[in-house]
């Protein structure tokens, strides 16, 4: 099944997705409303075996100016972190929370529903921001979306920083890990979700562990062991002693 490319004044798909309404229409046309196994409380617009985005190739997306649709999947690390936040609402309750690389928004929505005072969800992909906003509305969650790269966003107001499944390759780990450690040193509580990625950095302690049913096509296994973890530095340990 191919992605829909209906004619629209002769414009290529990438040009048609520059507006919020166009992005919403694209997401709703190419995903399904899904409840994922580990966080069934939330209904999300995601790719499934029967939706066009599932079989879209990287070359097809690149030719149309669309980034890989990471936002169309509830990755195991994100599910684990969302589950931990919902099961332990004291992690975020009453706090100002920033969710990095929010993707479909599952972690940010969980934080809002767990009682966070404010939730700011950040992603550099405009489609991800629209998808997270759409999913938040569907689940009655109030979150603010910020489109931008990690290094360009001011995180000094953050009391809790969340990052689900961001250590998926060497480049991503090198980009995220130093910033997350610095935020922990500055006093933020920094929580991540990870399903055993090879580039997970040191300095993390386990908060919870889950067996997450996933797709063989996406993860290469039917179940992934995923953990919610916290960055604990010497400074953070000393503050809590």
Image (cartoon, helix red, strand yellow):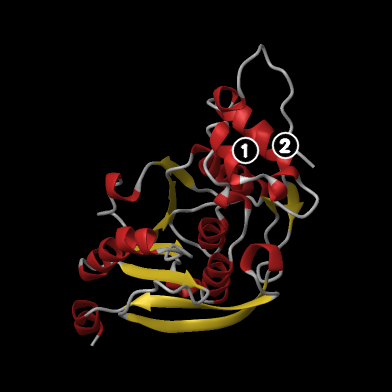
**Residue designated by label 1:** 60
Q: Residue at x 24, y 83 (%)?
A: 237
Classed neighbour count for the residue bearing mark 2: other residues with Cα under 10 Å, few (<14), some (14–19), many (≥20): some
Given contact means CB atoms under 8 Å apart, are the residues at marks 1 and 2 in contact? yes
* Closer-to-camera residue (29/108): 29
Q: Is residue 116 left or right of residue 212?
A: left
Comparing 2 with 117, the one in front is: 2
Residue 170 image position (x, y, % from top left): 37, 64
Residue 201 coordinates in the image, percent (x, y)? 34, 74
**139 with respect to 101 (left or right):** right
Residue at image x 21%, y 70%?
185
Q: Quadrant of residue 61?
A: top right
Q: Calculate the distance from the C-alpha at mark 1 to the C-alpha at mark 2.
A: 9 Å
Numbered disc 2: secondary structure: loop
Tell how many labels: 2
Q: Of all residues shown, which one is farthest toward the top?
A: 9
Q: Residue at x 62, y 56 (%)?
A: 73
Furthest toward the bottom, the residue is 241
Q: Say whether residue 83 is visible.
A: yes
In this rendered view, identify the residue nearer to me: 44 or 89.
44
* Mark closer to the chain start, 1 or 2: 2
Neighbor class of circle 1 (other Cα within 10 Å; few <14, some 14-19, many 20+) is: few
**Local secondary structure at mark 1:** helix
x and y percentages locating residue 231 in the rendered image: 33, 75
- The N terminus is located in which quarter? top right
Q: Which mark lies nearer to you, 1 or 2?
A: 1
Vertical comparison of 65 with 91: above or below: above
Where the C terminus falls, by quadrant? bottom left
Residue at numbered disc 2? 3
Residue 146 x %, y %: 42, 42
Q: Which mark is residue 135?
A: none
């Amino acid at each position: 099944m191919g992605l829909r490319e209906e004619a629209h004044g002769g414009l290529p798909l990438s040009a048609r997705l520059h507006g919020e309404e166009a992005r919403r229409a694209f997401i709703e046309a190419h995903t399904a409303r899904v409840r994922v196994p580990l966080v069934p409380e939330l209904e999300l617009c995601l790719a499934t075996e029967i939706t066009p985005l599932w079989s879209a190739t990287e070359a097809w997306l690149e030719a149309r100016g669309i980034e890989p649709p990471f936002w169309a999947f509830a990755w195991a690390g994100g599910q684990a972190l969302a589950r931990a936040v919902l099961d332990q609402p004291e992690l975020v309750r009453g706090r100002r929370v920033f969710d990095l690389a929010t993707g479909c928004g599952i972690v940010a929505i969980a934080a809002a529903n767990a009682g966070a005072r404010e939730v700011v969800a950040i992603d550099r992909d405009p489609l991800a921001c629209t998808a997270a906003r759409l999913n938040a509305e569907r689940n009655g969650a109030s979150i603010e979306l910020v489109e931008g790269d990690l290094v360009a966003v001011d995180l000094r107001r953050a009391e809790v920083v969340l990052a689900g499944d961001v250590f998926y390759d060497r480049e991503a780990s090198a980009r995220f890990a130093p910033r997350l450690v610095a935020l922990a040193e500055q006093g933020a509580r920094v929580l991540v979700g990870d399903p055993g990625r090879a580039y997970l950095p040191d300095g993390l302690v386990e908060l919870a562990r889950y067996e997450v049913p996933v797709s063989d096509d996406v993860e290469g296994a039917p179940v992934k062991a995923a953990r919610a973890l916290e960055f604990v530095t010497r400074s953070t340990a000393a503050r809590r002693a």
